[in-house]
Image (cartoon, helix red, strand yellow):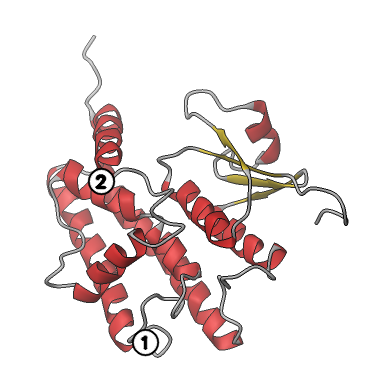
Amino acid sequence: MATEGEKEQVKLLGATLSPFVVRVRIALALKGIDYEFIQETMQSKSELLLKSNPVHKKIPVLIHNGKPVCESTVIVQYIEEAWGSKVPNLMPKDPYDRAVARFWAAFVDDKIFPSMRGVFLGQGEQLQKAVEESVTNFLLIEEALRTNQCFAGKAYFGGDQIGLVDIALGGLSAFIKGLEKATDSVLIDPEKMPLLSAWMDRFCKSDGVREVMPDFTKQAEFISTRRASMISPPTAK
């Protein structure tokens, strides 16, 4: 942290449409932390990015007083610990509730996103299989919202306020909706997943979220373009 009288320097290396960058921007916005947003591109990674994240060479990277922090869920937890005196609290105080939050945040990264990546890259039967896997994972989230003692009957996974799980899953909202439109598929069915659907709508309209959430149409256009470039067959020579 900066010493008394010094101004903290906070930089975020990222891209507007990246769902993982969106997570960090939401956390920073909720905590009311001023920062410099430095746009990165996939085509040409900056020297600062390569220096700050030499292992994965990926965004997002938070640079706090010259010290880089990498990986979105790690960054969100760092923000909570570094600015713990600022509300809202992004992590529960109770050790058990905190463990549950970390479990479901990891579920989003380990299960939800990989199945969505399968939708992004899939065609034909592979696409259908990936959609089915994604729906199965989202149904588990729906069940947690209905029955888990930490989440049931609450506005957010974090209770009355947005927390780690909300940010982990909610940061993917524009990507999920854009992917549905780009692939003409349904991943979150309001009839089958009323709690999850209502939560996502509430989350996306929340203060601190709607200001940084990418436009769904632009996200869909970006996904369609990227998807076409990645799954198109090679040109015959």
| Residue 153 image position (x, y, % from top left) | 33, 86
Task: Please say if 74 is above or below 7.
Answer: below
Q: Which residue is mark 2?
A: 178
Observer-nearest residue: 48 or 214? 214
Query: Residue at (39%, 83%) from the top-left corner?
Result: 151
| Residue 30 image position (x, y, % from top left) | 53, 61
The span from disc 2 to disc 1 (Cα, nearest Å) is 29 Å
Res. 148 mark: 1
| Residue 132 image position (x, y, % from top left) | 18, 61
Q: Quadrant of the C terminus?
A: top left
Observer-nearest residue: 36 or 231? 36
Query: Residue at (49%, 76%) from the top-left corner?
Result: 101
Q: Quadrant of the N terminus?
A: bottom right
Kindly tell me whether residue 198 is visible in this rendering: yes
Query: Residue at (57%, 74%) from the top-left corner?
Result: 91
Q: Amino acid at mark 2?
A: Gly
Task: Please say if 152 is above or below 187.
Answer: below
Observer-nearest residue: 229 or 124? 229
| Farthest-out residue, right | 4
Of the image marks 2 and 1, the number of the one nearer the N terminus: 1
